[in-house]
Amino acid sequence: MPISILGQNIKKIREEKGISAYKLSKIAGVGISTISEIENGKRQSLNSSTIEKVANALNVSVDDLLLTEDNKEYPAIDIFQTINTILTSDELLLDDIPLSKTEKSQIKKGINALFDIIRIQRGDEI
């Protein structure tokens, strides 16, 4: 049985915070078997009050437990890093045709050239 997004997110957040499944169950007031089953995919859903208890115990929002990585928003601060991240996607299209690795490399080189022009205009070292 596949692990649910909910189970994946609970486990990921719990581990990031250094909390054991047992400790999470005690803080949330939820059975350890419930936590274990949801994290391991044996149980695909929880009722809303249980989700709220787990979210509160992990000090996150319910949305943090339910959102997929695709739905999460990340602030784009550094344009170079953001573009590089975008170019790692295997699903990029131009005119409804997937971009090849060579085409992505060409885009990256072109963008780097534009950044160099901006740096020169600013008087920055290249």
Image: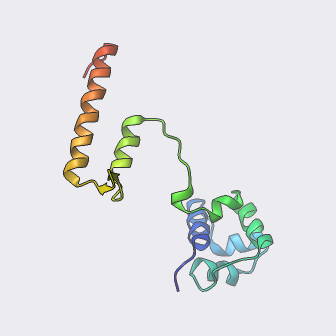
Residue at image position (68%, 84%) is 33
Q: Would you say 121 lies left or right of 36 here?
A: left
Q: Quadrant of residue 120?
A: top left
Q: Residue furthest left?
A: 102
Residue 31 on image: x %, y %? 74, 81
Q: Position of residue 109 (x, y in %)?
A: 22, 37
How is this picture coloured? Answer: rainbow
Q: Quadrant of residue 83?
A: top left
Q: Position of residue 118 (x, y in %)?
A: 32, 21
Q: How many marks?
A: 0
Q: Please, is residue 6 above or below residue 60 in the view?
A: below
Residue 121: x and y, percent? 31, 14
Q: Residue furthest front?
A: 95
The answer to whether 118 is drawn above or below residue 96 in the figure is above
Residue 95 higher or lower than 58, as above or below: above
Residue that appears at 69% across and 70% down: 24
Q: Which residue is rendered at x = 60% and y = 59% of the image?
A: 17
Image position of 33 (left or right of 118): right
Q: In the picture, which quadrant includes the C terminus?
A: top left
Q: Nearer the viewer, residue 61 or 91?
A: 91
Quadrant in the picture for residue 15: bottom right
Residue found at x 58% / y 66%: 9
Side of 109 relative to 84 (left or right): left
